[in-house]
Amino acid sequence: MGADSRAEHAGRGRIARSTLLAACGALLAGGCASMPDSGEVQTVKGSNTGDSQVRVYAVAPRENADPREIVDGFLEAMTSDDPGFATARKYLTKKAAASWRPEQSITVLATAPSRKQADRNTDPDKEGRVYPLAGRKIATVDARHAYQPVSPADYLWSIQVVQQPTAGGKGKEWRIDSLPPGLVLGEADFLRNYRSVNKYYFASGENWVVADPVYIRQRQDPVTRMDPVTQTVQALLDGPTNWLKQAVDSSFPSRTRLKDGVTTLTTDDQSTLKVPLEFPGDRVDGTACRRMAAQLLFTLRDLPSVRVEQVELLNKSESQCRLGRGQAAEFAAVQEADLDEKPYFVDEHGKLKKLVLAGKETAAPVDVPGPLGKGSSPALGSIAVDRGETRAAGVDRPGQRLFVSSIATEAATEEGSRQPVLSSRGVRPEDRLSAPSWGGRGDLWVADRNPAERRLWMVPGGTGEPVEVRTPWLEDDRIESLRVSADGVRIALVVKRGERTTLQIGRIERRTTDGESTVSVVDLQPAAPRMESVTAVSWAGPSRLVVVGKEAGGVQQIRYLQTDGSTSATSVLPGLNGVTSVSAPHTESLDTPMVADSEDGIVRLPPGTNWQPVVKDGDSPVYPG
């Protein structure tokens, strides 16, 4: 029984969902509608939309409400923006209201929690009722706002309702005495109330930032009373999520906090955001201040409610530094000079070619200099091009050998390119080398799928001695394909175990102990737990992936996912038959389409349109990275 069915109970319908619009909108094109002043109040069924403009207003329990109304009213009140969840607490006993911590966690269910029929409490003195709650659990959100998906599983909990004396002491009323921890929300209500934002921290020991996605309230937070901008700043100050903190650093000194009482942050007429902070010391280092400001600018740039062109950090009301968006660009993992992205592919002869997809027309493929393009290297089966588009890596069609060469000039030596950087001894082509991927530090990554010695390799700088990456989880698994993030801190892995192929996100850790350097991929997290089979993956921004796969009993689909595994109904892309690989640009430029390899050849997907054919005879389309 979800939110829709709960509406049929007596007492339900005291909570109205209202669509708040900034303007009248297209449906009222003929003029603004007037507010009706008569007619009965009708219930609007809930949990049917993720529209962020829909609001839920909680209403206190009515006098003499029965136990079912108390449970249903509380479940609805949890989905509201009521300050402090004050109305929701009116459904609880004094003891339960004092101990309930809605900010400590969120349990996300596929649909609104279903309230079952009551089991009578065995304690005759309490005359209580125990109402089981049921649903399909799909994720949790912890106190640091980190979203953690889980393989869909049954959710079972219970709410106990007891009778307590009324305020006047002349009667009794039903109130909830025992309840689940935190909030329990259906996915639609969760997406209506919360939005994903990227916090940014510096890759450990490096000068570029890494995205760390978290969820904040769409509007004012009921507990802290902070607006979305202030929530986002506070989340950044709280530090990286537990999963990422081993690989990143924050330039904010520990114990840095927002000035007491700050709940709203707005820009001035110059689009400058002044952030009043309290640092543990009296002075702030200038270089560190610039890096802090850069973290703030990157973090705030995607918020729809504000456009920040410059941030100014204040310490005890005194200005410490200012930084503009243009100045912060030096800390990006991918520089603007590398963002004129063009995809590459392998033609029918196994040669590296470049696609020109500007506008609606597709120009003829461009020959690429160097041995892997115009030269006489072995026919290629898969490729990768570095971010600067100066070098390419290719695995030959049998999947046995990995080659690297320059693509910046015709002068690249043929002899050097004929020497493989790495080889596989797998018997079958599918048991040999995966497609390669360039990491954020200019390193080259590839998996050897040989069942006799499954390994993950990293080639420093693309030309150094291959380093075996430590993968303690690889014994029973097989890496089908991989893609390293532009920041070099995360790796997307399509992993096969038994008959199931899943998408996992691993954290790349580099350690130097007693002069010996090691590289490891650890803490694998599911990024698409609802997909039973994943075919291909590509990075599509700092924390977004485009994934090809199937849900249980479903057909192949292409959709966007966040690296934390979260998604929304609007993330599904147009269907395409027989997709074997996909690649997306790092930016969401309107002129830079996604490309894929399908049964119809290489196709592209310009934003807002359907798939269009590009090259009939060719495969392995990739953007640099």
Image (cartoon, grey):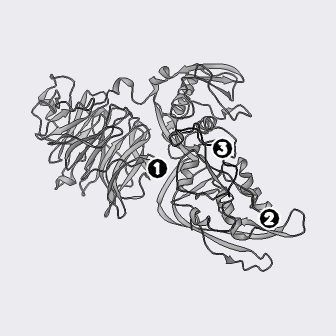
**Amino acid marked by disc 3:** Asp
Residue 133 place in picture, x, y as percent: 60, 68
Label 3 to label 1: alpha-carbon separation: 21 Å
Q: Which label's residue is closer to the chain start, 3 or 1? A: 3
Q: Nearer the viewer, mark 2 or mark 3?
A: 2
Q: Which of these two is toward me, 171 or 487? A: 171
Where disc 1 sits, the SS reads loop
Residue 394 place in picture, x, y as percent: 20, 39
Confirm or deny contact between disc 3 and disc 1 (CB under 8 A): no
Query: In this view of the protein, can residue 184 be seen by the observer?
Result: yes
The residue depicted at 43 percent of the width and 49 percent of the height is 522
**Residue tagged 3:** 221
**Amino acid marked by disc 1:** Ser
Question: Left or right: where does residue 57 sit relative to residue 504?
Answer: right
Confirm or deny contact between disc 1 and disc 2 (CB under 8 A): no
**Residue tagged 1:** 568
Q: Which of these two is toward me, 72 or 34? A: 34
**Residue tagged 2:** 63
Where disc 3 sits, the SS reads loop
**Above or below for 406 versus 47:** above
Q: Which label's residue is closer to the chain start, 2 or 3? A: 2
Where disc 2 sits, the SS reads loop
**Above or below for 171 versus 332:** below
Q: Residues within 10 Å of mark 3 (few under 14, many from 20)?
A: many
